[in-house]
Image: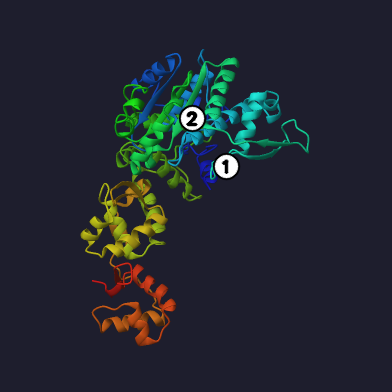
Amino acid sequence: MFSQSAAQFGLKGNPFDSSTLSASVHSLLPIATAFVGREMSSSESRTITNILRIPGGGRFVVEWEVGVGKTTFVNYHRYLWENETQDRLLTPIQEIVVDIRWGLKEFVFNILGALINKLVLLKGKEEAIAKDPLLREILILTKVYSSSSIQWQGSFMGAGLGYGKNTIITVPKISETQLVYYFQLLVQKVKEMGYAGIFLHIYNFDQISQENPKDMQLFFHKIRDILQIHDVYYAFVGYPGFYSQIINPIERVRSIFFLLPIYLPPLTEDKVLEAIKKRYQLLSDANFIKPVEDAFVRYLYHLYQGKFRSILDSLSSLLSCFPPYRVGMLTAQDAKEFLSQTLTQQISGVLTPKELSVLLAVSSQEECTGAEIARKLKMQPENVSRAFKELEKHHFIYLVKRIGTRLFYKINEQLKIIQSKTDNFPVDYKEKHTLSNLQKQFMEVLQSQEKINLTDFCQSSTVPIHRIRSEVKELVRFGFIEQHGYTKGTYYTKSR
């Protein structure tokens, strides 16, 4: 959809694409030229450069809020150290995404898989890899590994690897020690190819570490020794406080990391505008028209507290639904109104008034629990919990952290623009909703009683309980009645 909108403004592609910039020089937004804001003169770039200049390998943490550009920052330096330095470092195509359930074996296997895929890309085809005994063995291992059973056994038909059609290669179980040895041999092989070492980007700590800090500390205990393999550099990317919460408390892990994390605050307002201008330049043709005033970008900058990803996502949403007949640059005021109305229509189309009121209550706070919203709206916790599930399903809110049994949520960044537009929403529960005959019957019975449960209703009305469950669930969702409790003691009352 965006390609049509882009053409309206003389653009070859989406200048607001928030996905990670590509290392390929053939992409529309190559990282070598599109990267803006943390040049080599910045303190962040100087620090990471100094770490990577230390011979023998290293381990460090990059941290700050989601959406400020941590992944792109590390990927930019991975690109530089693989392509533009004298002591080049081989780096995989993508980041290595960590799973909380991993042990040492899974961690090493995923590293081997990422590196062997990069070597296949460099050499052009798997047949070239198969000519080297070590690389061939690693390639086979990565193809037959099963992460669910954590087994290294199976058979691999040698098609495409220089084996005959009827050749079966049986791969035995492999120990962690053997697997680590393969990694050490691969590091040496990479150095023989002319590289000074390997640069790995380890990712996905923003959510899993905050929810399971003890499990993540155990993970670092398990992988501690392999992090010290010579000539390998590890960049771990996480949330603010990741180093102090996960790394710092473990002395034997802390001792092998760079002393302090690299803090990556949001780009300045002017740098964000410069980055977007650079994207325009890379994608524009002779008929280029700036899609929106800079004032709107500045408005989004303050709305999202400088989070570049959220700014780009909002701009992308704005232009993806831009009327094809509209020509010319949008003013800041028009852009605000158009995006707000578009989001309002989308939200109102899928949520009930009660769910909308819960969403707006969440949007008015930095983060909150269901219990806090229940007190604020004077609703039963069960009904707020049901609304939260619906909001999560549509990605309107998301879980931020867990403290004991308390779950803290935030509104989706893209919906912050609706906070000042609450009058657009019908939040009074008086939505026109046609009741079924069975729902009318249930409401009539409830009118004459203070409360009722499903068993009593079914006994008095001879309606099978399986027929009434979904009908009552809908009444709760649309705010006609309130649910109290979750189990056998569940009963219903009229909404207040």
Quarter where residue 354 is shown: bottom left
- Determine contact: label 1, label 2, CB under 8 Å: no
Q: CA distance from mark 1 to mark 2?
A: 46 Å
Q: Depth check: 25 or 394 in front?
A: 394
Residue at horizontal 30 percent and vertical 65 percent from the top: 383
425 with respect to 290 (left or right): left
Q: Is residue 223 left or right of residue 8?
A: left
**Residue drawn at point x = 40 percent, y = 81 percent:** 438
Residue 242 visible in the snapshot: yes
Name above or below for residue 425 compared with residue 133.
Answer: below
Foreground residue among 199 and 11:
199
| Crowd around label 2: few <14 · some 14–19 · many ≥20 (10 Å) | some
Residue 146 shows which numbered tag? 1
- Place residue 351 in its image quadrant: bottom left
Which amino acid type is marked by label 1?
Ser
Q: In this figure, which residue is indicated by the disc labeled 2?
A: 281
Q: What kind of residue is marked 2?
A: Gln
Image coordinates for residue 90, horizontal then vertical, percent: 54, 22
Mark 1 residue crowding within 10 angstroms, few (<14) / some (14–19) / many (20+): some
